[in-house]
Amino acid sequence: MIVDPRRTIYKVLMVDQEADAEIIHAVYRKLARRYHPDADPSAEAARRMREINEAYAIARDPIQRAAYDHELSLRRDRRATDRILKRPGDVPLGPAGMPPGPPEGSVLEFGRYAGWTLGQVKRSDPDFLEWLMRVPAGRQYRTEITELLGRRA
């Protein structure tokens, strides 16, 4: 079974990841009664029953379950080790690259100037700030942009 953080054995079995073996067994039996080929001969039920059996085989074995949980946690934490992300709290840089000069103002977290402050954008591309004031994404920066552009005029 593929370890996918969006589709885990726990979601297949409809139990919490912290559920103990008794609860997992009880839920498995209930699902098995519902999707067993004798109860539901459809192809969808057969597919679902195979999926439930695979998930239960991992969940009932403490060693396999621990290995699965470890692999699942690595998958969930994968983004923290991606090269594109900097230290926690840093914003990944957009296509514009490294910002010029010292930081001044709020940091943009989107678009080509992601990782740049509004003051750095003003020095390089004041027209972008004027555009940003008109779009919904820039609503939170309007007061600061007005102040920065007012200094320019």
Image (tube, rainbow, N blue to C red):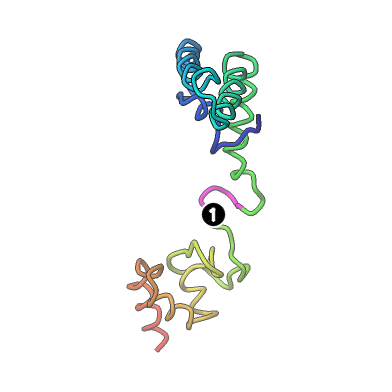
From the viewer's perspective, is 97 left or right of 108? right
Q: Is residue 86 magenta?
A: yes
From the viewer's perspective, is 49 left or right of 23? right
Q: Position of residue 71 (x, y in %)?
A: 64, 30
Q: Nearer the viewer, residue 153 or 35?
A: 35
Query: Extreme bottom residue here?
Result: 153
- Looking at the picture, does residue 101 appear above or below residue 64? below
Q: Position of residue 102 (x, y in %)?
A: 53, 69
Query: Which quadrant of the rendered structure holds the C terminus?
Result: bottom left
Q: Which residue is mark 1?
A: 90
Label 1: few (<14), some (14–19) or many (≥20) C-alpha neighbours in 10 Å: few
- The residue drawn where x is 46% and y is 71% is 118
Span of residues in magenta? 85-89
Residue type at the position of mark 1 = Asp
- Looking at the picture, does residue 79 appear above or below residue 44? below
Is disc 1 placed on a helix, strand or loop?
loop
- The residue drawn where x is 40% and y is 82% is 149
Q: Quadrant of residue 73?
A: top right
Q: Main secondary structure of the magenta part?
A: loop
Q: Nearer the viewer, residue 129 or 37?
A: 37
Q: Nearer the viewer, residue 120 or 48?
A: 48
> Exactly how many numbered labels are in the figure?
1
